[in-house]
Image (cartoon, rainbow, N blue to C red):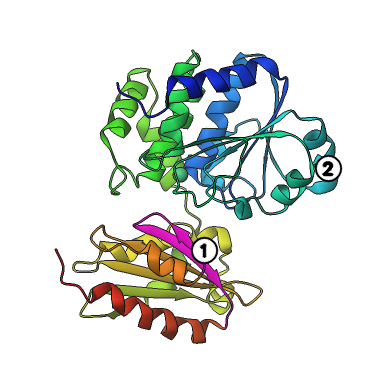
Amino acid sequence: MSGLIQPDEIARIDRIVSKYANFVITTHVNPDGDGLGSEVAFAEFLRQRKKTFSIINNSPVPENYRFLDPNAQMEVFNKERHIEVLTSADVLFILDISDWGRLRKLGELVHDLSLKTVCIDHHPVKEPFADVDIIYPEACSTGELIYELLKGLGARFTQRICEAIYTAILTDTGSFRFTNTNPAAHRIVAELLESGINPQKIYSNVYENQSVERVKLMARVLSELRIEYDGRLAWMKITQQMLKETGATLKDTEGLADFPRSIAGVEVALLFMELEDGKVKISFRSKGNVVINGLAQEFSGGGHAFAAGASTDGPIEAVIPVVLKRAGALFEKPKH
Ligand SMILES: [Mn+2]
């Protein structure tokens, strides 16, 4: 299998892991299956190498990914509690993050410390920020890169590692539906299945584990779905009021932005979410013919060509018309 990660990169990670003893692993705020699965797989490798490690994230593990962390080893960052761990750590592995900002408070603290940083990611990165950057936007997921890395490093592919990497690839490719689904995704997953993991169990954990509040929120949000630009753009909003009415919380909103893409003729889907502080989070999704990260950048966001995000000042009712108007430019050129 031809890989993305180069032998010298594997050798470099090998040297770092051999040389140091104390590691911290982290991923982005509101972690997803790719970030969490990559963390678990890499942590298991460190365990095999008899290293000391902590997994510290800015957000708790969502309910549907708890199966990845049965012993609840993943910690939620707290400066007072973790300053010692981070101060005495040698290396911080940052997985599935495209920018330092998404490390939030943990990033601010790490900036002031002297620990070595390694970033492994598949997001297009504006400015690499770590001491060692292993960044391949052509990878379907960070899980794909972790797989290659662990292969190169001679890790034992235990059940846990296989389940974690499977989850990473499954979720980041939208169950092998999104445009980032590449041959490597299927090759790797085929090998993981051969190791005996149970795809139905993983699917059920990840996708058949929704809260009633989330489903009620979905119904509420979809009831106000709007279509523009001759049916090529669909948009939805989630207000604080809707969250209150349905009893849903922020964590219940993950993945909702993808849904309107399922409508025939829709090329672009937008989700506007009113945050507690009045700011507005915008999710941009494309079916794959229209590139939308440029639009996200206009609102100081960014991301992949077909899945991006931004965050801007509210109020939400003022933001929506401005973004919709700018989105019109996406449809000016004829479809190809
Ligand atoms: Mn990812």
Q: Quadrant for the N terminus, please.
A: top left
Mark 1 crowd level (few <14, some 14–19, many ≥20, 10 Å Cα)? some
Closer to the N terminus: mark 1 or mark 2? 2
What is the x, y in percent for residue 139?
A: 37, 38
Tell whether position 180 is magenta: no
What is the x, y in percent for residue 59?
A: 64, 50
Viewer can see residue 325: yes
Q: Quadrant for the C terminus, please.
A: bottom left
Mark 2 crowd level (few <14, some 14–19, many ≥20, 10 Å Cα)? few
Labels 1 and 2 touching (C-beta < 8 A): no
Viewer can see residue 225: no
What is the x, y in percent for residue 37?
A: 51, 35
Magenta part of the chain: 300-314
- On screen, residue 177 above or below 158: below
Name the residue at 44% across, 26% down.
147
- On screen, residue 137 above or below 44: below
- How many discs mark residues in the rendered view? 2
Tell whether position 302 is magenta: yes
Would you identify the image quadrant in which residue 171 lies? top left
Name the residue at 83% across, 41% down.
83
Would you identify the image quadrant in which residue 240 lies? bottom right
What is the x, y in percent for residue 62?
A: 57, 48
Residue type indicated by callout 2: Arg
- On screen, residue 205 above or below 333: above
Secondary structure type for disc 1: helix
In this orientation, which residue lies closer to the viewer: 218 or 105? 105
Give the residue number, with chain letter if any, for mark 1.
213
Give the residue number, with chain letter if any, for mark 2.
81
Secondary structure type for disc 2: helix
In this orientation, which residue lies closer to the viewer: 4 or 239? 4
Residue type indicated by callout 1: Glu
